[in-house]
Amino acid sequence: MKNDFEEVRIAPAFGKLKTMVGLLPTSKGTIEFKLNRTKNKLSAEITLPITMAGNLSWQGTEIPLKKGKNVYGIKNEIK
């Protein structure tokens, strides 16, 4: 199976999990991610190949990802 695409959208659905770690080899390079969730925060470390664009989508927040390493912390509004 060949993974050949120009863009990626990372939209984690944790369920009962608190942490997700993975990698996806593509024809452009490897996408790597480490995601940690607490009650009101997502910590994300995502590395994209230098020729790929992407977005991180989590609970209504959309963040454009740059090429290379991206590190973000997203806090939820507690209602």
Image (cartoon, rainbow, N blue to C red):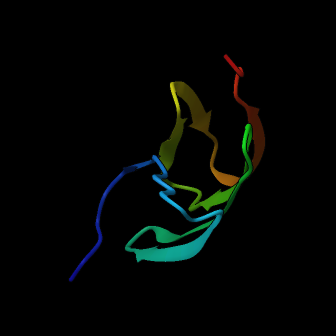
The percent coordinates of residue 30 (x first, y second) are 52, 73
Q: Tell me if residue 16 comes above or below residue 79 in the rendering.
A: below
Q: Nearer the viewer, residue 75 or 48?
A: 75
Q: Nearer the viewer, residue 61 or 63?
A: 61
Determine the residue positioned at 49% across, 44% down. 53
Q: Tell me if residue 19 comes above or below residue 66 in the rendering.
A: below
Q: Quadrant of the N terminus?
A: bottom left
Please state if 20 lies on the left or on the right of 52 as rendered: right
The percent coordinates of residue 35 (x first, y second) are 66, 59
The percent coordinates of residue 41 (x first, y second) are 75, 40
Please state if 5 lies on the left or on the right of 28 as rendered: left
Q: Nearer the viewer, residue 71 or 49?
A: 71
Residue furthest to the left in view is: 1
Q: Nearer the viewer, residue 62 or 8?
A: 62
Q: How many marks?
A: 0
Please state if 69 lies on the left or on the right of 53 as rendered: right
The percent coordinates of residue 22 (x first, y second) are 56, 75
Determine the residue positioned at 45% across, 52% down. 13
Determine the residue positioned at 53% across, 62% down. 16
Residue furthest to the top in view is: 79
Q: Tell me if residue 11 comes above or below residue 75 in the rendering.
A: below
Determine the residue positioned at 63% across, 49% down. 67
Q: Quadrant of the C terminus?
A: top right
Indicate the quadrant where residue 27 lies: bottom left
